[in-house]
């Protein structure tokens, strides 16, 4: 009996056996759909200093044949052969190709082949941007894909994305839907990418790519950039250089799961496929619908990593960051100085101190809200965004107006995507929480995540921003935090379409940001996510700056700021001076060193000023005053990194104004040098060799450079004459260079 039952079970579960016809089998004829022939051509996407060339053969197959320095007349590439094994410009699963795909579609009939052929293209130029749209099509399934290239001429940046359209009558499933694929030729490819964790964001990893696939990705959903950043530098060669050689930088404008994969294939070329991570996200595209992928941002430079960073920064200040390049105020943030423990009196005295030190804004961080479940620790209150009047009975407007009366702007913290289980909101709207039926809703920092795929939640999150703004007409700045990632993902709202969750969470966030900017274009909004866990060009379109890291220790911050600077401009990099021993690392450094590190970005302070000694206060006052004198160059100048904090004993960086008339130079000694070894020579960069620069050291009674106050040619400073004496570990010097 048992044996018979087993045979019966097998009969149910096994597919049709040999000899027996499968009733589900389809009848195939060998008829093929004809693909219209096209005139071979090369489509050129050009900036002032770069060229991307896409070859179209007579069958309409597209191949990227060049990206880099301008290579002359594009037509010279019409017959250029990269070999048939080289992936197409936007490789799809199907046809003869079976390498890394950018597109994978499953059709309603279960088939999964897509072959994209050129249909037409057009180019539209507007301002400094030329947009080229290449229309492609699969002639069997009618699926259409537009490949869109936005060339930013002056910045040498090209944005790439695709639009996938389902003009058919049945739904399809997008199993991979990358933004772009880029194919490159070089002898070696050195990949630099950015990894990390809480309080150690944007650390650098370097890998000489080999014949396999290297993937950088995240599956965290929110806090996407805590572990890996969706960006990289690619040196076309073996050795990383700040100053020389071809480097391509790439960054994806997406604040959720991403995947960037690098494959050196059998043709020895490198194919880079970048886009949303399709992990758990086979995206359904109904009949008539289209899907627009996020932008992949590329630049190329022959001036090493420094050149690639400067291109990205210039582009970001103009196009990639909300009000990019606009100088944001210096500030005192209450977090490390007061944490959750404060009264109105505490805040007013901090405002007094901030004003007397010359700071320009006071930011009230976490802890000001929730009545029934007061936010006195991170265990309660998130979701209940009303004032906790036990702490501030006079109200937010009272504090904000006080700040204004002292000449300071006022900012306030929110974390609108989150809810503590211990809150009224969690009880009122359990269905708004990200969750999966029957499974534990894991807590992280004692909190749950709200389901931003749900339009009601989007309204709520926008409402948190809006209502907070309405607490006072004197709110100038909002710090928007996001302190956890996704676990046990699931949305009650999405029903049986859970595949949409990861993508539509990010789209929901962007919808809220769009509403925020429609109503509040001038409010300064900081993007914070346990520090720098949402640093990407998707969020920066909406935010003015990022909280670079919860790590405020000057020693380790230098490395975090160095990594951040590879891709993101200084104008977004919020950097605060905090107390010692540092609350994260325990390190003790001088207040001058802490200022000299924080001043390389948007300077702020995050401590209790009344705990500073008179001497420290005096140094703080001077550093803040001098920062105001040069910060225009930090915000809008070109960055030149002088070495690396990971190599050697010294590191420096400098910003140079676009007209090269002014620069600010930051120099640091990071490891002990014996006195006999003399001083390190910093070879400055980016100056005009023929101009004379007056060099003035900042924030010191006694200068550490013999040339202080004198004028020198750019040539002298760049070719070896600049050697400030920094002989002790964790000492620093800052200089302004001005040419009349
Ligand atoms: C996060 C942020 C901090 C601070 C706290 C408040 O950790 O990164 O700067 O705002 O939240 O809870």
Image (spheres, rainbow, N blue to C red):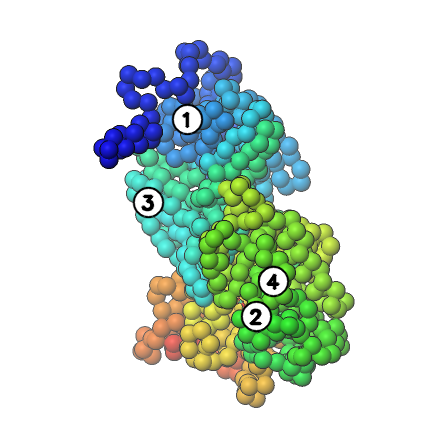
Q: CA distance from mark 3 to mark 2?
A: 47 Å
Which numbered dot is residue 380? 2
How crowded pointer 4 is (Cα within 10 Å; few <14, some 14-19, many 20+) is rated as few
Q: Is residue 173 above or below residue 723?
A: above
**Most foreground residue, 295 or 674:** 295
Q: Is residue 309 above or below residue 702?
A: above
- Mark nearer the viewer, 3 or 2: 2
How crowded pointer 3 is (Cα within 10 Å; few <14, some 14-19, many 20+) is rated as some
Residue 317 shows in the view: no
Q: Is residue 268 left or right of residue 701?
A: left
* First-in-chain label (2 vs 4): 2
Q: Position of residue 511 (x, y in %)?
A: 64, 48
The reply to whether discs 1 and 4 touch (Cβ–Cβ < 8 Å) is: no
- Reading the image, the residue beneath label 1 is 94
- Reading the image, the residue beneath label 4 is 427
- Reading the image, the residue beneath label 3 is 209
How crowded pointer 2 is (Cα within 10 Å; few <14, some 14-19, many 20+) is rated as many
* First-in-chain label (1 vs 4): 1
């Amino acid at each position: 009996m048992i044996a018979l039952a087993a045979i019966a079970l097998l009969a149910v579960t096994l597919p049709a056996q040999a000899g027996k016809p499968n009733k589900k089998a389809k009848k195939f004829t060998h008829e093929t759909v004809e693909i219209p022939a096209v005139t071979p051509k090369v489509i050129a996407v050009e900036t002032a200093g770069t060229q991307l060339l896409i070859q179209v053969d007579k069958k309409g197959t597209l191949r990227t044949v060049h990206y880099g320095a301008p290579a002359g007349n594009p037509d010279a590439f019409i017959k250029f052969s990269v070999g048939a094994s080289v992936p197409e410009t936007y490789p799809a699963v199907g046809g003869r190709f079976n390498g890394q795909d950018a597109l994978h579609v499953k059709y309603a009939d279960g088939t999964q082949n897509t072959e994209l052929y050129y249909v037409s293209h057009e180019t539209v130029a507007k301002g400094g941007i030329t947009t080229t749209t290449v229309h492609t099509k699969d002639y069997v399934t009618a699926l259409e894909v537009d490949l869109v290239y936005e060339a930013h001429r002056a910045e040498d940046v090209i944005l790439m994305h695709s639009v996938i359209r389902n003009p058919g009558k049945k739904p399809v499933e997008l199993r991979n839907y990358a933004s772009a694929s880029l194919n490159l030729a070089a002898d070696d490819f050195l990949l630099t990418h950015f990894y990390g964790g809480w309080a150690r964001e944007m650390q650098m990893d370097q890998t000489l790519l080999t014949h396999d696939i290297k993937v950088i990705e995240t599956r965290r959903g929110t806090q996407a950039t805590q572990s890996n950043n969706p960006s990289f530098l690619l040196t076309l060669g073996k050795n990383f250089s700040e100053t020389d050689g071809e480097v391509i930088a790439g960054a994806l404008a997406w604040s959720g799961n991403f995947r960037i994969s690098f494959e050196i294939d059998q043709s020895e070329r490198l194919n880079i496929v970048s886009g949303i991570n399709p992990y758990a996200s086979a995206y359904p595209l109904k009949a008539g619908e289209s899907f627009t992928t996020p932008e992949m941002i590329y630049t190329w430079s022959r001036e090493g990593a420094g050149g690639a960073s400067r291109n990205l920064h210039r582009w970001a200040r103009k196009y990639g960051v909300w009000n990019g390049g606009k100088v944001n105020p210096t500030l005192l943030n209450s977090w490390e100085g007061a944490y959750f423990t404060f009264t109105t009196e505490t805040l007013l005295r901090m405002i007094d101190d901030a004003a007397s030190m010359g700071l320009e804004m006071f930011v009230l961080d976490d802890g000001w809200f929730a009545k029934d479940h007061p936010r006195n620790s991170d265990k309660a209150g998130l979701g209940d965004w009303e004032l906790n009047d036990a702490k501030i009975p006079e109200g937010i407007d009272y504090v904000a107006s006080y700040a204004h009366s002292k000449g300071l702007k006022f900012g306030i913290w929110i974390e609108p995507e989150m809810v503590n289980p211990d809150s009224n909101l969690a009880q009122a709207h359990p269905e708004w929480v990200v969750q999966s039926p029957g499974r534990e809703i894991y807590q992280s920092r004692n909190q749950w995540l709200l389901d931003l795929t749900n339009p009601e939640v989007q309204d709520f999150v926008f409402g948190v921003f809006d209502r907070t703004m309405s607490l006072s007409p004197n709110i100038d700045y909002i710090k928007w935090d996001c302190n956890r990632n996704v676990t046990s993902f699931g949305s009650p709202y999405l029903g049986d379409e859970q595949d949409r969750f990861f993508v539509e969470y990010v789209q929901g966030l962007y919808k809220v940001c769009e509403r925020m900017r429609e109503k509040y274009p001038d409010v300064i909004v900081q993007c914070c996510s346990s520090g720098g866990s949402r640093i990407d060009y998707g969020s920066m379109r909406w935010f003015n700056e990022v909280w670079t890291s919860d790590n405020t220790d000057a020693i380790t911050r230098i490395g975090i700021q160095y990594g951040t600077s590879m891709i993101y401009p200084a104008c977004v990099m919020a950097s605060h001076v905090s107390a010692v021993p540092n609350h994260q690392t325990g390190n003790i450094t001088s207040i001058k060193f802490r200022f000299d590190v924080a001043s390389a970005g948007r300077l702020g302070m995050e401590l209790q000023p009344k705990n500073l000694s008179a001497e420290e206060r005096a140094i703080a006052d001077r550093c803040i005053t001098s920062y105001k004198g040069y910060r225009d160059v930090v915000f809008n100048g070109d960055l030149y990194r002088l070495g690396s904090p990971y190599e050697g004993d010294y590191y420096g960086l400098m910003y140079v104004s676009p007209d090269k008339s002014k620069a600010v130079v930051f120099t640091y000694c990071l490891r002990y040098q014996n006195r006999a070894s003399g001083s390190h020579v910093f070879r400055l960069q980016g100056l005009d060799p023929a101009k004379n620069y007056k060099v003035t050291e900042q924030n010191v009674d006694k200068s550490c450079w013999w040339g202080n106050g004198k004028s020198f040619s750019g040539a002298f400073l760049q070719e070896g004459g600049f050697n400030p004496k920094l002989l002790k570990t964790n000492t620093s010097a800052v200089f302004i260079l001005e040419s009349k």
